[in-house]
Image: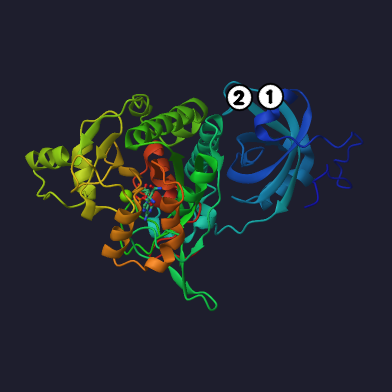
């Protein structure tokens, strides 16, 4: 895109050098100087002699003032071409003004429309239905709330990498096209040349286990796919999962890693994304209480507690969303529910020697009704038991030969977990639904935009 330069030939020509292009957060370093800011118009207001333009450049927002008496009629007339979301190059003098949002204002000497926008911009400052907004997601992203969510998401992603890097974990990429099924939930599949059916990965875990035997401590960070036929506020068909896997770590070690990670992520957003949390009107006092240790409740005790709280859950069933919400009622930080019944969980979890009806595992339930944000377990490291579970689940044994090999060649105690990024973002941002936590959500009824 050509960079707007001060206009010439219309009576406002200037011989001064081209002003520097400045991003809005950096205006403070240019007080008194003439600069150019590029961005999109968010608000316009004019009294006939003086006009106020609010512009957003993706990093910040600034108000600019255009005075007819200062710029002359040619430039003043361009005000008439301005519409919400038009892209512009604004040139003017930076003034410090404590009353201005952000503390600075531009007194304009030039306005160039670099990309016009028709007056029918679909998203207006009024209530729109959520389906309408999701249909216009490509434009909805421009609103301050949505941009704040994506900044928090990015902060959390960066914090995850920083957390594991500082602990000497190796980041490992695992395949998306797979032959081995990882979880019980719905599969997205496609025919794969002469190799039969390929599944889009529901988890990177099985490959993470192989990598842990090579690298000690690893984590994966990638998209995962589940053909979930559930229209709930916490299910996507494509979501991002972070899956650490640690050699020689047992289930207790695994939970300590989870509480350290979750607390770190919350603290990191609190310290670096306070402005975004304010934009989202998040009650930060709730987040400030998220510090280790998190309470641990045995599944069997959880079922008893739930029944006293009115649930009809029977021992053996997985916890539903309502049960999870009931369990964390009144909790000031996430809660671990440990050692679920074998039949409620995946084939790879290690049998609990203290109660073989159960497996060594945990879910991490976020407070404020958010429910499961992490599922984790110690892995079955005994060849025969693992094979028996694969057979019992009716899984195709030949697709798991390589996975069983990890139990033949130097089997090892190991554990890991999966943190669902979107549920984590929803919780930290205080959002009612995961659809706003990812730039372009994929759900059973949504493939566009
Ligand atoms: O509990 P899940 O199914 O566990 C696994 O996939 C294991 N392989 C993880 C591991 O041990 N390495 O999923 C883990 C997390 C859930 O706690 C939830 O946060 C998220 O992934 N998740 C979803 N998020 C959005 N939409 C969905 N459909 C999700 N399904 C799971
Ligand atoms: Mg789970």
Q: Which badge, 2 or 1, is on the more N-terminal residue?
A: 1
Q: Is residue 34 visible?
A: yes
x and y percentages locating residue 95 in the rendered image = 69, 24
Badge 1 element: helix
Question: Which mark, by number, is residue 245?
Answer: none
Residue at mark 1: 28
x and y percentages locating residue 114 in the rendered image = 73, 52
Residue 214, compared with residue 449, is above or below; it is: above
Instruction: Out of 254 and 118, give the one closest to the viewer.
Output: 254
Instruction: Out of 250 and 170, give the one closest to the viewer.
Output: 250
Q: Describe residue 136's horizontal placement relative to residue 63 as left or right.
A: left
Residue 228, compared with residue 86, is above or below; it is: below
- Asked if the residue at tag 1 contacts the one at tag 2, i.e. Cβ–Cβ closer than 8 Å, the answer is yes
Q: Residue furthest front?
A: 409
Instruction: Out of 407 and 180, give the one closest to the viewer.
Output: 407
Mark 2, residues whose alpha carbon is within 10 Å: few (<14), some, or many (≥20)? some
x and y percentages locating residue 46 in the rendered image = 61, 41
Q: CA distance from mark 2 to mark 1?
A: 8 Å
Looking at the rendering, which quadrant does residue 120 occupy?
bottom right
- Single out the mark in the foreground, 2 or 1: 1
Badge 2 element: loop
């Amino acid at each position: 895109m050509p960079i707007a330069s001060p206009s010439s030939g219309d009576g406002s020509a200037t011989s001064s050098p081209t002003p520097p292009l400045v991003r809005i957060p950096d205006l403070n370093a240019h007080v008194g100087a003439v600069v150019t800011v590029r961005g999109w118009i968010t608000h316009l207001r004019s009294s006939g002699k003086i006009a106020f333009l609010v512009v957003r450049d993706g990093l910040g927002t600034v108000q600019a003032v255009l005075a007819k008496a200062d710029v002359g009629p040619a430039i003043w007339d361009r005000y008439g071409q301005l519409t919400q979301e038009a892209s512009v190059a604004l040139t003017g003098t930076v003034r410090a003004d404590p009353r201005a949002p952000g503390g600075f204002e531009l007194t304009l000497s030039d306005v160039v429309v670099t990309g016009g926008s028709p007056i029918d911009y679909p998203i207006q400052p009024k209530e729109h239905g959520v389906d309408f907004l999701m249909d216009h997601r490509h434009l909805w992203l421009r609103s301050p709330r949505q941009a704040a969510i994506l900044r928090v998401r990015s902060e959390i992603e960066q914090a995850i990498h920083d957390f594991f890097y500082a602990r000497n974990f190796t980041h490992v990429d695992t395949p998306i096209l797979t032959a081995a099924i990882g979880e019980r939930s719905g599969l997205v599949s496609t025919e794969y040349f002469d190799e039969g059916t390929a599944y889009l990965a529901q988890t990177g875990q099985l490959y993470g286990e192989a990598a842990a035997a090579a690298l000690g401590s690893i984590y994966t960070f990638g998209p995962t796919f589940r053909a979930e036929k559930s229209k709930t506020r916490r299910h996507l068909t494509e979501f991002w999962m972070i899956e650490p896997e640690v050699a020689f770590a047992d289930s207790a070690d695994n939970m300590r890693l989870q509480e350290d990670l979750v607390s770190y992520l919350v603290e990191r957003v609190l310290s670096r994304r306070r402005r975004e949390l304010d934009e989202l009107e998040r009650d930060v006092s709730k987040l400030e209480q998220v510090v280790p240790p998190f309470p641990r409740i045995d599944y069997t005790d959880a079922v008893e507690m739930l029944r006293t709280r009115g649930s009809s859950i029977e021992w053996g069933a997985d916890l539903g969303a309502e049960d999870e919400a009931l369990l964390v009622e009144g909790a000031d930080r996430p809660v671990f529910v440990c050692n679920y019944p074998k039949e409620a969980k995946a084939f790879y979890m290690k049998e609990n020697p203290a109660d073989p009806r159960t497996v060594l595992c945990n879910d991490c339930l976020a407070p404020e009704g958010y429910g499961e944000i992490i599922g984790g377990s110690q892995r079955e490291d005994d060849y025969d038991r693992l094979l028996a579970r694969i057979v019992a689940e009716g899984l195709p044994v030949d697709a798991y030969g390589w996975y069983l090999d990890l139990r033949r060649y130097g089997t090892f105690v190991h554990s890991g977990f999966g943190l669902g990024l979107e549920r984590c973002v929803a919780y930290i941002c205080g959002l009612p639904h995961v659809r706003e936590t990812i730039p372009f959500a994929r759900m059973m009824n949504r493939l566009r935009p």
